[in-house]
Every structure is written in structure tokens, then in C-alpha cells.
């Protein structure tokens, strides 16, 4: 390197929430398989890159470690999926993703957010309750699983 000027470009490591893109799909599918007993297929994720959807990713030091997918229908935002890499759970990332989804739905003038959650999913249920979601119903055998399926709690957060 004598006489040459070495130019070293060090990009600052990026962390935080940003919109998901289709380029994220391989990593999203990897996270999905780690997070869910019945993971979504790539085709389902591809359908979520439309105007009536919002898709957020959580990046830690340039690596995608979580995501949230929301669909909009009439005045309702529907939280379809939220998932955090097992090694990054319990650090507030799921809550940050949920809060971003809610904040943007409010900015987009929607009236409420609804979601389904497996009855056995204590961590997710506690997260939703702590953000103000209330149970408004049950969908029997909504999720695939042993003994004919598992019930879903339907939860709602009214924005006003
Ligand atoms: C549900 C999920 C997204 C939560 O993400 P996370 O980043 O670990 O959650 P946070 O660290 O933001 O925790 C937020 C709250 O959730 C609840 N929570 C999270 N993990 C919990 C656990 N293991 N046990 C009990 N409550 C838990 C707590 O109320 C927590 O608040 P606190 O830290 O003040 O106690 C994550 O567990 C996950 O990806 N699970 C697999 C996929 C899934 O089940 N998605 C939901 C489908 S409806």
C-alpha cells in the first residue's frame, strides 16, 4: 500500500424499524420457520406487498430479526403476523413493531386494529393486552394443530 491512500468505508451498523421489501423474503421465511409451528409460505408473503398492506421489518446491526404484516380493510387494520427471531425476544422488539403498526394505522385514519392469536400463545397475548387490546371473541379451531385445531382469541384495539 506504499504511496497509496487506503480508503476504508465503514458503514454505520443500522438498527431499527423500516419497511420490508421483497428482497427480505428469504430471511423473512427463515424467521417465519423459526417462529411459527405452521409457517406461512413464500406465496402468502408475496401477496402482502400490495397497497392495502403494511409490512415492517426490525433490523439489528444490518440483519433482519423481526417483522410485522398488517392488512387494511375498510377502516380496520388487521395484524396478520408478527415475529421476532428467538435470540432477540424479550428485548422489546415485538412491542416496537406493534407500536409502529398501530401508529401508522392511526396516521392512515383507520379506526381500530384487530388480530387473532392462539389461545396457548401466552407471550403474544400478554403483549397485546399490555398495549390495550381486548378480547372480543373466539374463533373455534381457527389454527391448524393437533386434535382438530386450536381456538383463536380475536382481539381488538379501538383507536378512539
Ligand atoms: C410474540 C413475540 C412477537 C413477542 O416479541 P418479543 O420481542 O419477544 O416481545 P417484547 O420483548 O416486545 O415483549 C413485550 C411483552 O410481551 C410479553 N412477553 C414477551 N415474551 C414473553 C414471555 N416469554 N412470557 C410472557 N410474556 C412475554 C410481555 O408482556 C412483554 O412485556 P414486558 O417485557 O414488559 O413483560 C415473539 O414471542 C414471537 O416472535 N413469537 C413467535 C411468533 C408469534 O407467536 N407471533 C404472534 C402471533 S399472534
Image (tube, rainbow, N blue to C red):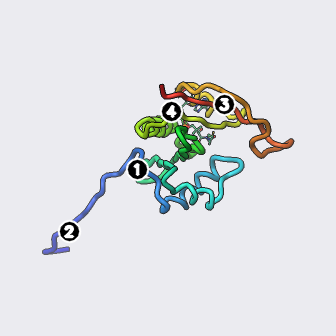
Q: Of helix, strand and loop, which one carries label 4?
A: loop
Q: Give how far across and how far down residue 66 sits, in percent.
A: 52, 47
Query: Which residue position is annotated with label 4?
Result: 111
Q: Nearer the viewer, residue 18 or 108?
A: 108
Which residue is pictured at 59% across the width and 45% down the height? Answer: 81
Q: How far is disc 3 from disc 1 in space, using C-alphas?
A: 29 Å
- Residue at numbered disc 3: 122
Q: Earlier in the sequence, mark 4 or mark 2?
A: 2
The answer to whether the residues at label 3 and label 4 have Cβ atoms under 8 Å apart is no
User: In this picture, is 70 found above or below 153?
Assistant: below
Residue 61's tag is 1
User: Dividing the image into four equal quarters, which quarter contains ligand 1?
Assistant: top right
Pointers 3 and 2 in contact (CB under 8 A)? no
3 or 60, nearer to the observer: 60
Which residue is identified by label 2?
6
Q: Label 4, label 2: how many angstroms apart (C-alpha)?
A: 56 Å
In the image, taking residue 84 as reference, residue 99 lies left or right, namely: left
Q: Give the residue drawn at x 53%, y 44%.
A: 72
Image x and y of residue 103, in percent: 43, 35
In the orientation shown, which residue stands out farthest toward the left?
3
Residue 44, by quadrant, is: bottom right
Amino acid at each position: 500500500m506504499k504511496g497509496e491512500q487506503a480508503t476504508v468505508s465503514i458503514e454505520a451498523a443500522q438498527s431499527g424499524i423500516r419497511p420490508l421489501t421483497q428482497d427480505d423474503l428469504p430471511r423473512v421465511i427463515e424467521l417465519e420457520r423459526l417462529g411459527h409451528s405452521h409457517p406461512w409460505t413464500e406465496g402468502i408473503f408475496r401477496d402482502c406487498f400490495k397497497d392495502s398492506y403494511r409490512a415492517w421489518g426490525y433490523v439489528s446491526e444490518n440483519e433482519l430479526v423481526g417483522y410485522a404484516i398488517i392488512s387494511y380493510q375498510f377502516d380496520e387494520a388487521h395484524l396478520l403476523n408478527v415475529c421476532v427471531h428467538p435470540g432477540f425476544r424479550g428485548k422489546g422488539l415485538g412491542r416496537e413493531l406493534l407500536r409502529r403498526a398501530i401508529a401508522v394505522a392511526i396516521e392512515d385514519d383507520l379506526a381500530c386494529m384487530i388480530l387473532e392469536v392462539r389461545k396457548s400463545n401466552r407471550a403474544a397475548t400478554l403483549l397485546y393486552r399490555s398495549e390495550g387490546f381486548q378480547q372480543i371473541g373466539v374463533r373455534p379451531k381457527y389454527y391448524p394443530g393437533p386434535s382438530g385445531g386450536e381456538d383463536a382469541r380475536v382481539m381488538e384495539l379501538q383507536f378512539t
